[in-house]
Image: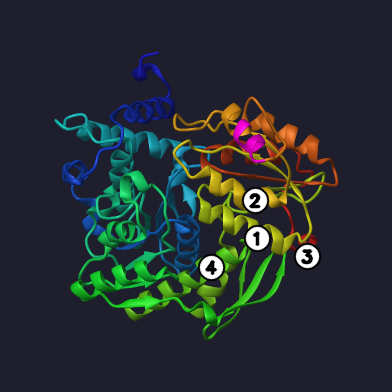
Amino acid sequence: MDRMKQPPIEAAFSYLKGLTAYGSKPGLSRTRELLRRLGNPQNRLHFVHITGTNGKGSTAAMLACVLRHAGYCVGRYTSPALVAVNERICVDDAPIPDDDLAAAVRRTARQADAMADHPTEFEFVTAMALDYFAGRRCDIVVLEVGMGGALDSTNVIGPPEAAVFTRISLDHTRILGSTLAEIAAVKAGILKAGSAAAVSEQAPEVRAVLAQRAAELGVPLRWCDFSQLHCTDRCLGGQQFDYRTHRGLFLSLLGAHQLKNAALAVETVELLRARGWEISDTALHDGLAAARWPGRFELLLRHGPLFIADGGHNPDCAAALAAALRDLFPGEKFVFLVGVMADKDYPAMLAAVQPLAVRFVAVRPDNPRALPAEELAAFLRAQGAEAETAASPEAGVERAMELAGPDGAVCSFGSLYMTGAVRAQALKHRKHPTIERADAE
């Protein structure tokens, strides 16, 4: 069907899907040109810029929620989407409406299609999002790096109010570098003179790289101190914790790794306060308590069987997942529903969870880079695990739940590219529309 004859939102989705043909190309020149053609909307915005390997999206969700509770109009840009691109572009936690998205795609496409060097899909959506945020007069935008830092298209912005570094580990090594120091150097590219930075715990070589680059630019660093992070109460409804002088904070997101992300959010809030942003302790408490980030160690079903969905997609994520499962469900064994990208270190990922597995159901996520389910299952069997395949993530949900039985437990992980489909299918089995906190306790 001709795109012009489609409904506006379908035409927009078709256009964006077509941009994947441009692949991924390094450099900021295309994004800068596109933004110039759009009137440089980024120059009318303030930013919190977040990079790292794991926890970027969760930290972004927490910070955006805190800033919204402080009374600001907050843009949030993240990737990838679990279901639709709308999720990646939010204002005050609401995804961009279909009509606005269709209009934004048309406006941006008029400029992009006139360029000699056409932007890639990520470059296009980044520029479109910044233009949308400026049009909505956002007070501040929480901007998540797509990959790396220095040459990521989000790095076209000027000095942010705060640069934020979640934990950096080995991932995308063919693109970013084969050592932690090399990867850290790329991610340090978001540091800019005139800004300040909050940094999570890091390996010594990463810490050294960030400290050196910050010193060169005169950027003050605020380091997390997890010796001052204490969980005071934990249940399936969330976690209560203290960090530094802040007492009685609550987070609905589960897992010790999310408490570390929350501590990083607190450090970022302190940086913003020092730069004149008015964020009360009440806004901090209420914002953290209200923060949600679907598909990241998310309890979808409490029973019939219990079902956890996690988007963990590298060895550090898998280790954090295994630790959280042991902590919250001691002695429990799981049917793991798993799908991975072929270019990931999936042997290390699977090794982290295999001691907790009674069986694996392998599926192929909806992505060209995905490992075929048959290859994944064969690998697992070679490691001594019981494994079978399912034709799709949705079919995998049904089979994993059947294998676990009403009194068992299922955990889905391996790729965000299948998490949206898994969530939707699992939630069809939920007997109540929400899991009340009181019930979870």
**Is residue 321 rendered magenta in the image?**
no
**Is residue 382 rendered magenta in the image?**
yes
Question: Which mark is first along the chain, 4 or 2?
Answer: 4
Residue 206 appearing in the image:
yes
Above or below, 245 against 161 in this view is: below
How far apart are the two marked residues, 2 and 4, measured between alpha carbons?
Answer: 32 Å
How far apart are the two marked residues, 2 and 1, measured between alpha carbons?
Answer: 11 Å
Above or below, 202 against 117 in this view is: below
Give x and y (percent) for residue 117.
17, 32
| Residue type pointed to by label 3 | Glu
How far apart are the two marked residues, 4 and 1, measured between alpha carbons?
Answer: 23 Å
**Residue under label 4:** 287
Give x and y (percent) for residue 131.
28, 47
What span is in magenta? 378-383
Which residue does the image show at 38% across and 47% down from the upper left?
A: 172
Question: Which mark is first along the chain, 1 or 3?
Answer: 1
| Residue type pointed to by label 1 | Ala
**Residue under label 2:** 353
Residue 441: mark: 3
Foreground residue among 387 and 213 = 387
Q: In the structure shown, which secondary structural element does the residue marked by tag 2 occupy?
A: helix
Q: In the structure shown, which secondary structural element does the residue marked by tag 1 occupy?
A: helix
Which residue does the image show at 34% across and 19% down from the upper left?
A: 4
Q: Nearer the viewer, mark 2 or mark 3?
A: 2
Left or right of 420? Residue 308 is right
Residue 324: mark: 1
Say which quadrant the C terminus sits in.
bottom right
